[in-house]
Image: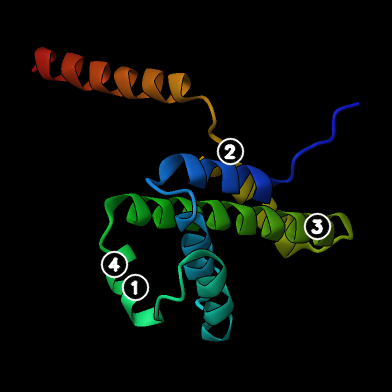
Amino acid sequence: MAKERSPQSDLNKKLESMLSNAKLRHFVRWFTDGQDESKWEQLSKNYFNNISLDKAKELYLEKKDVQDAILYVTKFQKDLNLVKIYNSMMKKAMEGDVNSATWVIKFSESAFFDGDKEDKFKKLTDKLKTKFEDNEDE
């Protein structure tokens, strides 16, 4: 049986594919994981030829691929955190918390679970078609 890859492993692979230099993944992860300056020295020593933190920020934060990767990780973390919140609220709802149950219902109806882009496109075109037909009738 094949070993499942963790979401973090998949994230790292995705970052490496997005970046002009795969080592920049370490900068992006450090940057999006809280920018702990005490960890920078070791990270710089291992991957960035002992570059100073200020110089690294100056060089790397200007790069479009790094900016895109930071945005990607931020969205990934947001979605992961929303799933954690959802699971926590679901547990409370299952234990009888009415407010949590209400939250779960509202969240379940939100755009977070809209995975079918084709369905979104159909809804959009239907709305446009309806508006167009309404304008023709006037």
* Secondary structure state at the residue bearing disc 1: helix
The CA distance from mark 1 to mark 4 is 6 Å
Location of mark 1 (residue) = 57
Name the one closer to the observer, 78 or 71: 71
Looking at the image, is mark 4 or mark 2 nearer the viewer? 4
Q: Specify which label sits upstream in the sequence, 2 or 1.
A: 1
Residue type pointed to by label 3: Ala
- Is disc 1 surrounded by few (<14), some (14 to 19) or many (20+) residues within 10 Å? few
Location of mark 4 (residue) = 59
Q: Is residue 82 left or right of residue 111?
A: right
Q: Is residue 99 left or right of residue 69?
A: right
Q: Specify which label sits upstream in the sequence, 4 or 2.
A: 4
Looking at the image, is mark 4 or mark 3 nearer the viewer? 4
Marks 2,1: beta carbons within 8 A: no
The CA distance from mark 3 to mark 1 is 44 Å
Residue type pointed to by label 4: Leu
Name the one closer to the observer, 17 or 77: 17
Query: Of the numbered discs in the image, which one, if any, rests on residue 113?
Result: 2
- Is disc 3 surrounded by few (<14), some (14 to 19) or many (20+) residues within 10 Å? some
* Secondary structure state at the residue bearing disc 3: helix
Q: Specify which label sits upstream in the sequence, 2 or 3.
A: 3
Residue at horizontal 33%, vertical 49%? 65
Q: Is residue 135 left or right of residue 91?
A: left
* Quadrant showing the N terminus: top right
Location of mark 3 (residue) = 93
